[in-house]
Image (cartoon, rainbow, N blue to C red):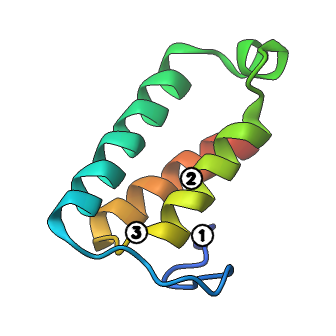
Amino acid sequence: MGTVSERGLDGGGQPRKSDAWSSQVAHSDILHIKSVIQRLSAEDLNESRLPPAYWRKRLQEIMQSHQLSKSQFDEIDRLLATLKE
């Protein structure tokens, strides 16, 4: 299985936040998105006001805005793969 995310790339040309607060914010955001995706079926996600494209964009913004650990990138990769199904 290949990597879905563009690890370490900052597409917007903006510096990433790298302090402990930023890491905690990224962690909280990832957990929130994970909980939403796990609660809703693929059909529910597609029919909701916040479709998979919204959640993919949120995950991409986290990758571009924060300095992430390997485990955070791995979790984002899993979530992105789930949203592609």
Q: Mark 3 belongs to which amino acid?
A: His
Q: Is residue 65 left or right of residue 23?
A: right
Residue wearing tag 3 = 66
Please give the count of numbered marks on the rendered protein: 3
Q: Nearer the viewer, mark 2 or mark 3?
A: 3
Which quadrant is the N terminus positioned in? bottom right
Q: Is residue 22 above or below residue 51?
A: below
Few, some or many residues within 10 Å of mark 2 (<14, 14–19, 20+): many
Local crowd size for mark 3, using a 10 Å CA cut-off: few (<14), some (14–19), many (≥20): many
Please state which amino acid type lies under the numbered disc 1.
Answer: Ser
- N-term mark: 1 or 2: 1
Q: Is residue 43 left or right of residue 35?
A: right
Q: Label 2 near label 1: C-beta < 8 Å?
A: yes
Mark nearer the N terminus (3 vs 1): 1
The amino acid at mark 2 is Leu
- The residue sitting at 35% across, 37% down in the picture is 31
Quadrant that contains the C terminus: top right
Q: Residues within 10 Å of mark 1 (few under 14, many from 20)?
A: some
**For this rendering, which residue is in front, 61 or 41?**
61
Q: Secondary structure at mark 1?
A: loop
Residue hosting label 2: 59
| Image spot of residue 33 (x, y percent) | 48, 34
Is residue 54 in view from this perspective?
Answer: yes
The answer to which of marks 2 and 3 sits earlier in the sequence is 2
Give the residue number, with chain letter if any, for mark 1.
Answer: 5
Q: Given the current orientation, which residue lies at the most extreme left position? A: 20
